[in-house]
Image: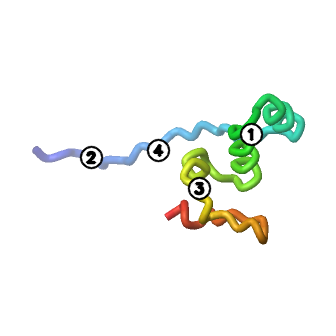
Amino acid sequence: MPIEGQIEPARARLHPRPPVVMTKSEVRRVLSQVQGVHLLMAKLMHGSGSRLMECIRLRVQDLDFDRNLANLLKLLT
């Protein structure tokens, strides 16, 4: 069945949404409500910019206590 006329692509609508960024005081308030292992995980995720599953998959072998580093590159592959 032949199509008559020219077919134009439809443009996707952009919904400008500013990124959600917490202020320093909001971060302090959230971290003050968390305790134990969850506090450690929250601080690690906030400080390194890692996601929840990256934090969960973190192993002791990925930590360098001598240099105070966490090797997150292995988690991204």
Q: Amino acid at mark 2?
A: Gly
Q: Return the residue at label 4.
A: 11
Q: Return the residue at label 2.
A: 5
Q: Earlier in the sequence, mark 2 or mark 3?
A: 2
Q: CA distance from mark 1 to mark 4?
A: 44 Å
Q: CA distance from mark 2 to mark 3?
A: 57 Å
Task: Locate the N terminus and report the quarter of the image it occupies.
Answer: top left
Task: Find numbered disc 3 in the image and state the secondary structure of the residue it sits on.
Answer: loop
Q: Return the residue at label 1.
A: 39
For the residues bearing labels 4 and 2, Cβ distance under 8 angstroms: no
Q: Earlier in the sequence, mark 1 or mark 4?
A: 4
Q: CA distance from mark 4 to mark 3?
A: 41 Å
Q: Earlier in the sequence, mark 2 or mark 1?
A: 2
- Looking at the image, which residue is at 21% across and 45% down? 4
Task: Find numbered disc 2 in the image and state the secondary structure of the residue it sits on.
Answer: loop
Q: Position of residue 12 (x, y in %)?
A: 48, 42
How busy is the neighbourhood of tag 1: few (under 14 within 10 Å), some, or many (20 plus)? some
Q: Position of residue 5 (x, y in %)?
A: 27, 46
Decide if residue 61 is on the left or right side of residue 3.
right
Q: Quadrant of residue 74?
A: bottom right
The disc label shown at residue 58, or none: 3
> How many labels sit on residues?
4
How busy is the neighbourhood of tag 3: few (under 14 within 10 Å), some, or many (20 plus)? some
Q: Earlier in the sequence, mark 3 or mark 1?
A: 1
Q: Position of residue 52 (x, y in %)?
A: 59, 45
